[in-house]
Image: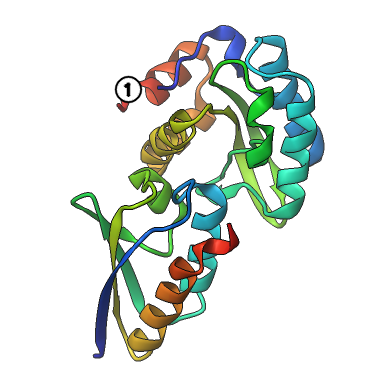
Amino acid sequence: MAMAQREIELKNPSGLHARPASLFVAEANKFQSEIFLEAKGKRINAKSILGLLSLAIGQGTVIKIEAEGDDAEQAVAALCDLVASGFGE
Amino acid sequence: MVKLDARHVALNLGSEPKEDAIRRVGQMLVDLGHVDAPYVDSMLEREASTTTYIGNGIAIPHGMPDSVQYIRTSGVVVAQYPDGVDFGGEKARLVIGIAGKGEEHMELLSQIATVCMDESNVERLVQASSVDEIVQILERVS
């Protein structure tokens, strides 16, 4: 089972509110891997909008994205690209 | 923090189109003095751009980022739809209207999400027959 993980800082000014959380989960769901997001000492299923919103991740927070599965590398790369893009904000 | 009283909760509503549900919770926010009327239009605009359905039978309509000017005080209202409202193929049984100023927006989202991640809490909210039950479940988390 392939595993991948990377840390990245959240840049968009308003943090991971509902719209970016929805975009993140939509991207995560394109992959078969199990994907987790860790921030502020908590680890949640990154395919759950509720999970992401529960963390209230603000601008400047470093998040860790982890994936386990055949497409783990691709999943982490795609999600990091999305975060780096600032979700178009 | 979520602060509710009887005026913030509408129980046992019949199913209706999602736009009507959004107007309903928007109007509750207006009537309670949390927002000015244009905020409701922004809630509809936000829904049209990306759905506010977030899973577990919950939708959280709120305005676009530029509508913060219409928020007077942060507030949350809860509409309970036992038969659900169709949000783009997903059924929302709780429609939670949110007006959050500044940092409070993320805090409100987090508090609601923390409660509603637990499906047993959602079930209790959907079946609640009194405002007190809703208030207890939603305000308990901090």
Query: Which residue type carries mark 1?
Result: Arg
- For mark 1, what is the residue? B140
On the rendered structure, is B65 left or right of B23? left
| Residue in the foreground of this view, choosing between A79 and B114 | A79
Q: Secondary structure at mark 1?
A: helix
Which quadrant is the N terminus of chain B positioned in? Answer: top left
On the rendered structure, is A12 left or right of B18? left
Q: Position of residue B5 (x, y in %)?
A: 51, 9
Tell me how many marks there are: 1
B122 lies above or below A55: above
Q: Position of residue A6 (x, y in %)?
A: 27, 75
Which quadrant is the C terminus of chain B positioned in? Answer: top left
Q: Position of residue B138 (x, y in %)?
A: 41, 25
Q: Is residue B14 visible?
A: no
| Residue in the foreground of this view, choosing between B126 and A51 | A51
A37 lies above or below B9: below
On the rendered structure, is B61 left or right of A39? right
The colour scheme is: rainbow
B52 lies above or below A2: above
Q: Position of residue B96 (x, y in %)?
A: 58, 31
Rendered residue at 43%/64% (across/down): A47
| Residue in the foreground of this view, choosing between B112 and B102 | B102
Q: Quadrant of residue B108?
A: top left
Q: Quadrant of residue B114?
A: top left
Rendered residue at 36%/79% (across/down): A76
Rendered residue at 78%/21% (across/down): B37
A58 lies above or below A38: above
